[in-house]
Image (cartoon, helix red, strand yellow):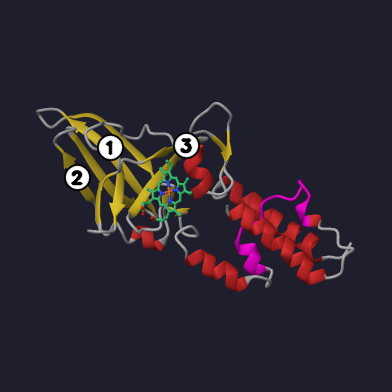
């Protein structure tokens, strides 16, 4: 989605910048990578559209999990016990990141197991709430706790009630193609991606932005 918008904006950018009919749209070459929607504003062509789109729920539907507004949702360590699952959950900050953990204690209070993961992405614009994703190598999973806007509280993510899913639910491509724009899924491996727009792909996108914009605005 973001990719498509960014591309179409860059195409119109070229038309606007160059005018006339003998234009070669060098930025639509398959060799030109995704440039990121901020390039639309950075090119000084579509600043208004870029900023207004960024305010929409779609424009805010996925972001890194360690931005100041996310960190503010964890002013102190959050602990939640779910007796029906016999599991203890925590959300806590360490350095500039947010982590979630799940653990089981036996009758004497000894830890049976504990699993902890750093959160990498937040999904949702907050109309209902926010869910978190984390990455292990190339695999993307959902975290068990979500933040609900209605009462500003952390609780089990939708679908986790009554079932101990823990950190094992992989993130499918249907969700990410809308939330992330241009994920590169690995075929036949649900939850595995070669890249997303943020994270590893971000560097590539930023590097390509300069090239693509130069191609866009230079006359051939
Ligand atoms: C058609 C595009 C689209 C698809 C497909 C999609 N989402 Fe969303 N989703 C959105 C948008 C836009 C928002 C932001 C609006 C909002 O926060 O309600 C959102 C919000 C959310 C939220 C925040 C909750 C809320 O209502 O505020 C969660 C969690 C979520 N999506 C998870 C998923 C998962 C999991 C899938 C795959 C099963 C998925 N989405 C598929 C567009 C999509």
- Residue that badge 3 annotates: 172
Is disc 3's CB within 8 Å of ligand 1? yes
- Residue that badge 1 annotates: 160
Q: Residue furthest left?
A: 108
- Determine the secondary structure under disc 2: strand
Number of the front mark, 2 or 3: 3
The answer to the question of whether label 1 and label 3 lie on touching residues, with beta carbons closer than 8 A, is no
Number of the front mark, 1 or 2: 1
Q: Position of residue 49 (x, y in %)?
A: 59, 69
Mark 2 and mark 3 lie on one chain; the one further toward the N terminus is 2
Q: Position of residue 34 (x, y in %)?
A: 66, 52
Give the residue displayed 24% in from the left and 41% down from the top. Answer: 89
Bounds of the magenta span?
27-42
Is 22 above or below relative to 102?
A: below
Mark number displayed over residue 80? 2
Q: Position of residue 171 (x, y in %)?
A: 45, 37
- Determine the secondary structure under disc 3: loop
């Amino acid at each position: 989605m973001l990719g498509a918008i960014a591309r179409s904006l860059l195409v119109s950018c070229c038309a606007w910048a160059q005018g006339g009919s003998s234009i070669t749209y060098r930025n639509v070459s398959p060799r030109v990578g995704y440039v990121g929607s901020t390039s639309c504003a950075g090119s000084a062509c579509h600043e208004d559209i870029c900023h207004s789109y960024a305010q929409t729920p779609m424009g805010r539907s996925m972001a890194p999990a360690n931005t100041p507004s996310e960190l503010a949702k964890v002013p102190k360590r959050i602990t939640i016990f779910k007796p029906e699952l016999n599991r203890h959950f925590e959300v806590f900050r360490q350095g500039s990141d947010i982590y979630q953990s799940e653990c089981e204690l036996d009758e004497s209070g000894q830890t049976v197991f504990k699993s902890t993961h750093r959160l990498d992405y937040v999904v949702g614009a907050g109309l209902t709430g926010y869910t978190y994703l984390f990455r292990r190598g190339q695999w993307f999973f959902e975290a068990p706790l979500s933040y609900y806007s209605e009462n500003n509280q952390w609780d089990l993510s939708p679908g986790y009630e009554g079932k101990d899913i823990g950190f094992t639910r992989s993130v499918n491509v249907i969700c990410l193609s809308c939330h992330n724009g241009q994920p590169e899924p690995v075929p036949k491996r649900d939850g595995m991606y070669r890249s997303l727009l943020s994270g590893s792909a971000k560097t590539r996108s930023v590097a390509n932005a300069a090239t693509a914009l130069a191609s866009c605005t230079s006359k051939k």
